């Protein structure tokens, strides 16, 4: 473990559960759909902020969980349409702003037009370097582990991999975020204090931050507050506080 990743200078990877769109709308006696539209506006602002921030390299946003199919059909349909129209209107802007777009999750469940748009967005922006924007869509941490297990067992069955060779780092290679650093800071808006099947493996040592602010109201200053909280913490990774202090001093 390098001293660098123990310091709480500023998060390089921020992962957010954008929760509270429905309640935001309901508080205003508006349909939940309006809350989801307002949520997209908040996404734009937070992406802009992270792209301009020189320390933030990865922003991961939970857009649709593998459990969100359980919602009323009309809401699922609305979310799918919103996902597609947002992609259609944003891909060029993301590209212009040097942002690399990536999706994690089981995309085979989406309709083919949406899948095509997702691939197009990834292809177009793959060389961009200002920020990697990871959108988790039909994603679940358990799904991610299960698909990694499937690949690993196929490799074992074919004789390519010995079961004894399976360790944490081999498992990690087959997870969706294998090539990216784990989140430093996890934020959940909307007041719930749970992980809801997001990045179960990767959150092992992530600093958790919960705020009652509903996602459509989450803005630059709310994000700065979360980052300030992150910076005030000492990440110990199992070491003692004194060890970390000694490692951090020049
Ligand atoms: C998060 O907001 C957006 C998605 C899950 C797609 P919610 O829709 O969960 O909002 P609440 O929790 O009902 O307020
Ligand atoms: C988590 O929010 C998923 C997303 C934000 C996409 P939910 O609103 O679905 O989570 P639960 O059901 O309250 O745990
Ligand atoms: Mg919710």
Image (cartoon, rainbow, N blue to C red):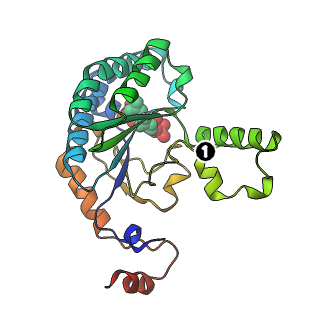
Q: Is residue 103 above or below residue 227?
A: above
Q: Residue at x 26, y 31 (%)?
A: 95
Left or right of 228, for residue 233: right
User: x and y percent of residue 38 in the render?
Assistant: 24, 29
Left or right of 108, for residue 48: left
Q: Is residue 106 above or below residue 235?
A: above
User: x and y percent of residue 156 in the render?
Assistant: 79, 44
Tag 1's secondary structure? loop
| Residue 185 picture quarter | bottom left
| Residue 48 picture quarter | top left
Left or right of 54, for residue 133: right
Could one spot residue 27 in this view of the protein? no
Q: Residue at x 47, y 49 (%)?
A: 194
User: x and y percent of residue 208 in the render?
Assistant: 40, 58
Q: Is residue 45 above or below residue 164?
A: above
Looking at the picture, tell me which residue is in the foreground, 136 or 154: 154
| Residue 17 picture quarter | top left
Q: Is residue 206 above or below residue 86?
A: below
Q: Which residue is mark 1?
A: 174
Could one spot residue 144 in this view of the protein? yes
Q: How many marks?
A: 1
Image quarter of the C terminus: bottom left
Q: Residue at x 53, y 41 (%)?
A: 176
Left or right of 98, for residue 179: right
User: x and y percent of residue 44 in the render?
Assistant: 23, 34
């Amino acid at each position: 473990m390098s001293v660098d990743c123990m310091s709480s200078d500023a998060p390089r990877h921020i992962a957010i559960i954008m929760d509270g769109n429905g309640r935001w709308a309901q508080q205003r006696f508006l349909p939940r759909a309006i809350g989801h539209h307002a949520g997209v506006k908040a996404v734009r602002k937070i992406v802009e902020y992270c792209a301009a921030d020189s320390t933030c390299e990865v922003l991961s946003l939970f857009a649709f969980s593998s459990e969100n199919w359980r919602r009323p059909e009309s809401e699922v349909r609305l979310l799918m349409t919103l996902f597609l129209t947002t992609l259609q209107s944003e891909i060029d802007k993301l590209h212009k702003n040097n942002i690399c777009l990536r999706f994690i999750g089981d995309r085979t469940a989406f309709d083919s037009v949406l899948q095509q748009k997702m691939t197009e967005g990834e292809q177009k922006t793959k060389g961009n370097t200002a920020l990697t924007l990871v959108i988790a869509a039909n994603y679940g941490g358990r799904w991610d582990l299960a698909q990694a297990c499937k690949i690993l067992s196929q490799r074992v069955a074919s004789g390519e991999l010995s079961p004894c060779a399976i360790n944490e780092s081999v498992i990690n290679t087959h997870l969706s975020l294998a090539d990216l650093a784990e989140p430093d800071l996890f934020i959940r808006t909307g007041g719930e204090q749970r992980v809801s099947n997001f990045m179960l493996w990767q959150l092992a040592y992530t600093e958790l931050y919960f705020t009652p602010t509903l996602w459509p109201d989450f803005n630059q200053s709310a994000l700065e507050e979360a980052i300030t909280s992150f910076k005030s913490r000492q990440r110990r990774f199992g070491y003692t506080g004194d060890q970390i202090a000694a490692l951090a001093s020049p």
